[in-house]
Amino acid sequence: MVKKRKRGKGLWSRLREDRMALWSLTFIVLVGLAGFLGPLLSPYAPGGLEERRILEGPSLSHWMGTDGLGRDLFTRILYGARVSIVVGIGTAFIALIVGTAYGLISGYAGGSVDHLLMRVVDIFYGLPDLLIFILLSLVFGRNIVGVLIALGLVTWVRFARITRGQVLQAKELIYVEGARAVGASHARILLRHILPNILGPVAVTLTFSIPSAILAESTLSFIGLGINDPYSEWGTSWGTLAQDGWRAMRSYPHVILFPGLAIFLTILAFNFLGNGLRDILDPKGR
Amino acid sequence: MVRYLLRRFLHGVAVLWVVVTLTFVLMHVAPGGPFDRERRVPPEVLANIAAKYHLDEPLTRQYARYLKELMQGDLGPSYKYIDRNVNDIVLETFPVSATLGLLALLFALTFSLPVGLCAAYYHDSWADRWCMFLATLGISLPNFTLGALIIWLFSLQLGWLQPGGWGEPSRLILPTLTLGAAPAAYLSYLTRASLLEALGEDFIRTARAKGLKESAVLLKHALRQSLIPIMTVLGPLVAALVTGSFVVEYIFAVPGMGRFFITAVTDRDYPLIMGVTVVYTALLACANLLVDLCYSLIDPRIKSLET
């Protein structure tokens, strides 16, 4: 059942009332900006080695200290933000496009087509995410594109399920019958009538799949099976940075503290934003 | 009942077959091989190795051989550990992973049910908000960050517990906490949400109208109803615990299946990778079946056994 909502307020003004979600959104925008404006914010190059300042604690010149090769940790974290943001948002959108299309077709077609398509989804669902992700990234390579494809292939199933469920409900509603009665084509009914009405839950799924992609990527990079380029000029994954810090943790805890904190806060912000959006867009999912 | 079990079994076998086939194809598509070395190896040696593991046969023959051996319960030889086959490794490491996973599940359940109950009981109060805030923190904390934090605090600073290893029960505490934290947070969310939904139903109003105490309404009537969504996620959760243990086993140096899987992937030890995948898939199928069987125990209206 689609409940009638008060249409008086737009999404933005309702989101503004949710302080937690608003702070989170601000933080996410800052992280994104930091990632792409990193070179302007930091005087150091991400690969700039300083032999005399290896594993230094935080100081005025190196806000987060330096790592085992004397690289400025703050700079490395700024550049790492790119990786996380690109992986998170990229995965979510790949999965959104594939999964939503799949779910729309499956739910709308119904019958044996639906049955068959959902069997495929069941198989994907019946496998541990991290496992498929590892197997796929073996094939597609341990670079950012390979990880995006692998994560997208893991994540699309969620969108397929959510979309199909919503379509099944929506296609029984009066307005769809009305559209059909006036002779609208299937494509038109799907894209103009059903899709706009199920966007709420899909948007919520989108928001929540960003942090889980970031989490998966950094976890895999931490155990050495994710993006593997510790000397990249473009940006090194926070997971790889945490792995560096893990090895030095006994004596130099700051090297793992900051990457760990960066991952945690970014994921947290996306989750709070997701909670806020869900309360507004999908009140039943609370 | 028998027919239902048989159908589920056949479905499980079909899923397993698809997974085995897909993994087999993926492993052979993937660039790089287990016997690639920096140093040039004489072609005769390579030919010998290929002959030993039947790698010189056409792919279809290899695939058929693998399936045949799999049906006999043989997961093949390990490329890396020359004197052992995959069966030995799985038999040795699976109990370790299973112990850790089940302990973490137990921890998650004992933690999350009271928290979820409390949050639902004091709905919209500060207690509720704090519970949910903590749950969001727990979901957002990556395993490795939490693990590092826990080791740093309890092992390096306080010196209470060993930072890893296996054997004495005390070594199990830190990995269990690390592995169970995220599921605990997630289950708290779920318990609260499904309790709140159950509390809105008619039979709750009836129970209250009868003059039952609020605690009895919550524990006897609402909780039972809300166990169903919790049961539903337990299947995937078991999988998450077993795979989440990749990282936890790595951090705490636990000699479980996950750690072997990581090294198998790095070494391209294909039979071991496939073996672990098969075991995980079979495990997950069993967990899901158990969950479905439990539905009808909790809620007699669900008659999954008869359809």
Image (tube, coloured by chain):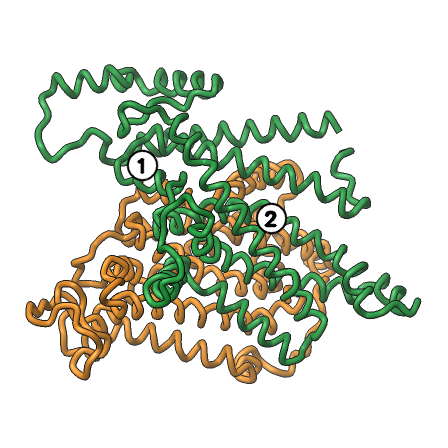
Image location (x, y in percent) of residue B29: 30, 33
Q: Is residue B164 left or right of residue A114?
A: left
- Among the chains, which one is green? B
Image location (x, y in percent) of residue B99: 50, 43
Image location (x, y in percent) of residue A40: 19, 79
**Does residue B131 sit above or below B68 in this rendering?**
below
The chain ID associated with circle 1 is: B
| Circle 1 residue | B264
Query: Badge 1: how crowded within 10 Å, few (<14), some, or many (20+)?
Result: many
Q: Which amino acid lies under the numbered mark 2 shown in the image of this protein?
A: Leu
Q: What's the residue at 20%, 74% (across, down)? A: A57
| Circle 2 residue | B234
**Does residue A180 sit above or below A252 in this rendering?**
above
| A124 or B156: nearer the viewer | B156
- Among the chains, which one is orange? A
**Does residue A225 sit above or below A71 in this rendering?**
above
Residue A178 visible in rendering: yes
Regarding mark 1 in the picture, which secondary structure is present there? helix
Q: Which amino acid lies under the numbered mark 1 shown in the image of this protein?
A: Ala
Which numbered marker is on residue B138?
none
Residue most extreme to the left:
A51
Alpha carbon distance from label 1 to label 2: 28 Å
Q: Is residue A277 left or right of residue A81?
A: right
